[in-house]
Amino acid sequence: MIFKASVTKDGVHPAVWFALGVAEALYSLMQKQLVVTSLKDSHGHRPASLHNQGRAADIRTKNLPLSQVEAVYSRLKAILDPMGFDVVLEHDPPHLHLEYDPKNGENWLKLEVA
Ligand SMILES: [Zn+2]
């Protein structure tokens, strides 16, 4: 995992780091470098953005062919959505946005008993 020089890591919620770890594993399986392009930075012009609360991350997709972008998006969504994350494939510019915004008791730390 590497970070664009403009990325601010201070004050990022632990759940976001967990989600980035999942993304890192998926990118690693595809033998691609995970590049984080935004955490708590770059969204001051959008006050409502969860980036400003340290609850969102942007991930580069331009280093992946479209088939891999779609694969990593669907896998990330399947893993993270039930734990309270929203995963969005943004198009302008293309990137993956993920945010921790739990609803209805969703909790990234809540584990079911097997
Ligand atoms: Zn974002």
Image (tube, rainbow, N blue to C red):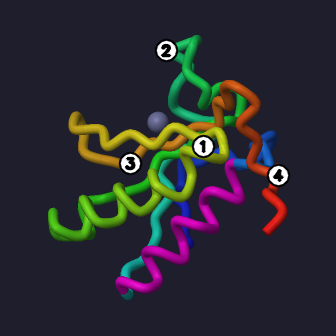
Type of amino acid under label 2: His
Look at the picture and state if 36 lies above or below 67: above
What residue is pinned by disc 2?
45
Is ligand 1 closer than 8 angstroms to the Cβ of mark 4? no
Please tell me whether mark 4 sits on a helix, a strand or a loop. loop
Identify the magenta region.
16-30
Residue sitting at x 76%, y 30%:
105
Q: Quadrant of the N terminus?
A: bottom right
Q: Are marks 1 and 2 in contact (CB under 8 Å)?
A: no
What residue is pinned by disc 1?
39
Q: Nearer the viewer, mark 3 or mark 2?
A: 3
Q: CA distance from mark 1 to mark 4?
A: 21 Å
Q: Nearer the viewer, mark 1 or mark 2?
A: 1
Q: Nearer the viewer, mark 2 or mark 4?
A: 4
Please tell me whether mark 3 sits on a helix, a strand or a loop. strand
Q: Nearer the viewer, residue 6 or 69?
A: 69
Q: Earlier in the sequence, mark 1 or mark 2?
A: 1
Type of amino acid under label 1: Leu
Q: Residues within 10 Å of mark 3 (few under 14, many from 20)?
A: many
Q: CA distance from mark 3 to mark 2?
A: 19 Å
Q: Earlier in the sequence, mark 3 or mark 1?
A: 1
Q: Nearer the viewer, mark 1 or mark 4?
A: 4
